Each structure stands twice: as structure tokens, then as C-alpha cells.
Image (cartoon, rainbow, N blue to C red):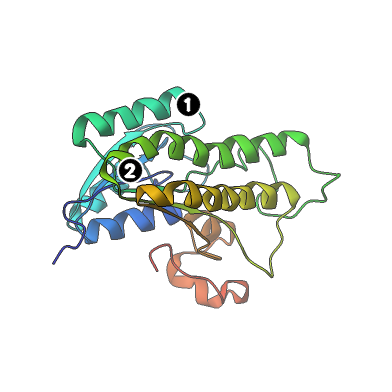
Amino acid sequence: MLPLKSKIAMVTGASRGIGRGIAVVLGECGATVYVTGRSRRGGPAAAGVPGTIDDTADEVSRRGGQGIPAECDHRDSKQVDALFARVREEHGRLDLLVNNAWGGYEGHSGGLRPRNFWDAPLSLWDSMIEGGLKTHLLATYFGIPLMLPHKSGLIISTIAWDHDKYIGSFYDIAKHSIARMLWGLALELKPHGIATVALAPGFTRTERVLAAFKITEDQWRGVPYLKKTESPEY
């Protein structure tokens, strides 16, 4: 039985990591999934990590759904508008939107290493807002009109909410702003039958995390720091 056989979904930032994990499991449930991101097969590779929207879309289809790769820079409102116009033209609606696109670290060294608020470059703030919060806002803004006529829909945004981990003020502000946005939208959209959820997956063994520790998925149990982690598909 495929419970999502007739559903149209979009997962942003799904070339790899949590986005890929969500997309392929939606495929297992039979959904049609628009897999969005910037990494294309045969194109420039992301630094140090594998994965493209084409690879993920193929895996969605292999598992029983229909994967549709859709290249998009989610920081660009024109590209995002065009993406949702395509969904409207091809299917006329959107049942599920998963906001996972995140480019907050691009161009900055240090990765997940916490920084003092007063030492962090202001360009890092710009990246967190432009590559993080804005990507969720734009997709939600253009996605809602595809749900409103049908009085149904679900919007999920992946966030970070670990009480025992701190990655710096800029990161926390960006992630928690997404949660606050979803809370407000829940109030606005309730009369229209559309639900919103801010989802904190926790510490996840994405390709970037495994690359940082120079290990494969089969080796993580030998790293004490990764003891309380999960795979992107859990």
C-alpha cells in the first residue's frame, strides 16, 4: 500500500543530507516529489560531499514514487516563483512542502564551530539570513497559493533546537526565526485547513558530518561524539 500515491510534494535542499532522507522516504510512500537544489549531475560538485538532485530524484522513483529534479537557487525569488509556477502548471496543486534548503555556511571557514557574537564576521550573518531564513520564507510564500484552493496542505521546515548544543548567535537567530515564522503561519493558515510544523531532527549523520570526521556511515559507532546521532532517513 502506498499511502501518498496521489500526493504532490516538494523537498527543498534535497541533493543530500536530511532533505534527501525525507525525499526518498516520501518516495517509498508513493508520492510525487519535486527534488530541489543546485547540485546537478555532471555539474560543479559541492565541496567535499557527494549528491545531486538527479541522484535523489532517481532514488525516489526507485523506491516507488515519482522523483522530479528541479534546479533552483532558493535565495532567488524569481527562480522560486518560476519553480512553483511549474508545479502549478504540471499538477495544479501542492500537498506537502518541506523546507530544508540551507546555505548559511557558504564562503565561511569554521563550519559548525561556535563563534563569539562579537568575533563573527557580519558577512556570516548575511549568509545565515539569506541562505537560511530567506530560503524557507520564499518557498513558503510561493507554495501557500497552491494549497489554499484545496483547503488542505502541510508545510514543514527543518530547524535546530538542541538544548545541549550551541553553534553561535547568528545560527540560532536564523533557525529560531524559522520556527517563529511557522508558529505565526499556523495561526494564519488554520482557517484554510493548512498545517505548519517546525521539525528539529537533531544531530544527524549527513554527508557533511561524516566527511568532517573522515568516516563512512558504517564507521560512525567508533566515534564517541556521534553516539547520539541518527541517519537522515530515520
Q: Which amino acid type is marked by label 1?
A: Ser
In the picture shown, does residue 106 fall above or below 198? Answer: above
Residue located 60% across and 51% down the image? 180
Q: Quick one: label 1 or label 2, which is nearer the N terminus?
A: 2
Residue 183 marker:
none
Residue located 39% across and 27% down the image? 81
User: For numbered disc 2, what is the local secondary structure?
Assistant: strand
Q: Is residue 156 visible?
A: yes
Q: Which amino acid type is marked by label 2?
A: Val
Other-residue count near label 1 (Cα within 10 Å), few / some / many at <14 / 14–19 / ≥20: some
Residue furthest to the top in view is 78
Residue 77 marker:
1
* Quadrant where the image shows the C terminus: bottom left
Residue located 22% across and 35% down the image? 92
Residue that badge 2 annotates: 35
Tell me if label 1 and label 2 are in contact, CB under 8 Å: no
In the picture shown, does residue 120 fall above or below 2? Answer: above
User: For numbered disc 1, what is the local secondary structure?
Assistant: helix
Mark closer to the observer (1, 2): 1
Residue located 53% across and 62% down the image? 200
* Quadrant where the image shows the N terminus: bottom left
How far from the left and from the top, in percent, is residue 66? 19, 48
C-alpha distance separating marks 1 and 2 = 18 Å
Q: Is residue 45 visible?
A: no
Tell me the quarter of the picture where residue 103 sits: top right
How far from the left and from the top, in percent, is residue 140? 44, 40
Near-viewer residue (65 or 106): 65
In the picture shown, does residue 130 fall above or below 26? Answer: above
